[in-house]
Image (spheres, rainbow, N blue to C red):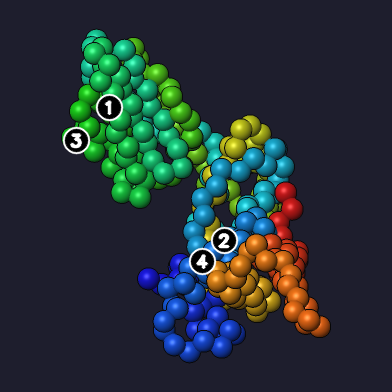
Amino acid sequence: MAVGTYALTSLDNLKAWIGVSVATYDAVLEQSIDRSTSIVESYCDRRFMSRTFREWVEPKGSDTLTVSHRPIVSVNTVSFGSAQAMSISSDTSTTDVLATMGVDEDGLRLHKVASDGTTTTASLAFSTYATTSALVTQINSSVSGWTASLIANAYARTLYRFAGRGVLNASGIIDYADDNGSDYRVDYDAGETHLSHDVPFNSFKPSRFPRGFHPVFVEYEAGYATAPADLEQATIEIAADLYRDRLSDRTLASESLGDYNYSQTSVADLLADRVGKLDAYREIR
């Protein structure tokens, strides 16, 4: 195996820190790195290494929105507004007792319950069907019991999220965030996107993001190409604690033999000390 794609340190760096040169324990050390990375990210409520994120954000009518991860590397789209993308209906409405559709983070979900109680679910992943045109084509050619019609070919990930919408007796319309033509300023370090005000008074371009329930879709890349040294060091120390603790007697807090006394610090206390060094990176929401 190998450490995870977004691990905050490497196997070589951890081995150098704990003084291990042989490959005997590589699998355990790699697991320790992945778990320490998870501990650090959970404590800080952030994902640190650079990757693509997609979020529906609620700026509450402000002209600035803040995404969940930083520093921003690049922004692919900031989309809002609403337009119709496609319609979906059930081909077997007379023999079904339930037909619903929904859109989640990963794709489109079509669910049916037939009159005899048979349940079928079709899930179409956005990673495979990246446009509404591709979704419609797949539904009509390969998803039994459903019909789809294209209204506008759109980026599938900009479809608004919803769940359990009934389409047994009528077609259901799916909307997408269609406006991505406005001007923005980006604070890359702070993870903020600002909607510019320098537009003519009579322009149709907005000067505020819309209100509502998560009305703005943002796709962006954020994170570090290389983990900051102090962040990596904390991860290494936590991974080393996890590795060493695997063989310790957790029921033993202290022992003595004559004048010799030994007290063992629990791994929980060690971890608390390590993560306390990460406060500068911790996200406060």
Residue at (61% x, 61% y) in the render:
39
Q: CA distance from mark 1 to mark 3?
A: 14 Å
Quarter residue 202 falls in = top right
Q: Which residue is denoted by mark 3 in the rendering? A: 142
Q: CA distance from mark 1 to mark 2?
A: 36 Å
* Of the two numbered discs 2 and 3 in the rendering, the one whose residue sits closer to the viewer: 2
Query: Is residue 217 or residue 69 the one in the foreground?
Result: 69
Label 1 is placed on what type of residue?
Thr
**Residue 38, numbered label:** 2
Direction from residue 116 to residue 65 in the image, left or right: right
Q: Position of residue 157 (x, y in %)?
A: 43, 44
Whether residues under marks 1 and 2 lie with C-beta atoms below 8 angstroms apart, the answer is no
Label 4 is placed on what type of residue?
Asp
Q: Is residue 26 above or below residue 151?
A: below
Q: Mark 1: few, some, or many residues within 10 Å (few <14, many ≥20)?
A: few
Direction from residue 98 to residue 200 in the image, left or right: right
User: What secondary structure is found at the residue carrying circle 4?
Assistant: helix
Label 2 is placed on what type of residue?
Ser
Whether residues under marks 2 and 4 lie with C-beta atoms below 8 angstroms apart, the answer is yes
Q: Which residue is denoted by mark 1 in the rendering? A: 120
Residue at (28% x, 23% y) in the render:
119
Query: Is residue 45 or residue 134 the one in the foreground?
Result: 45
Direction from residue 14 to residue 234 in the image, left or right: right
Instruction: Kindly give the residue lying farthest to the right in the view shown.
Output: 259
Q: Which residue is denoted by mark 4 in the rendering? A: 34
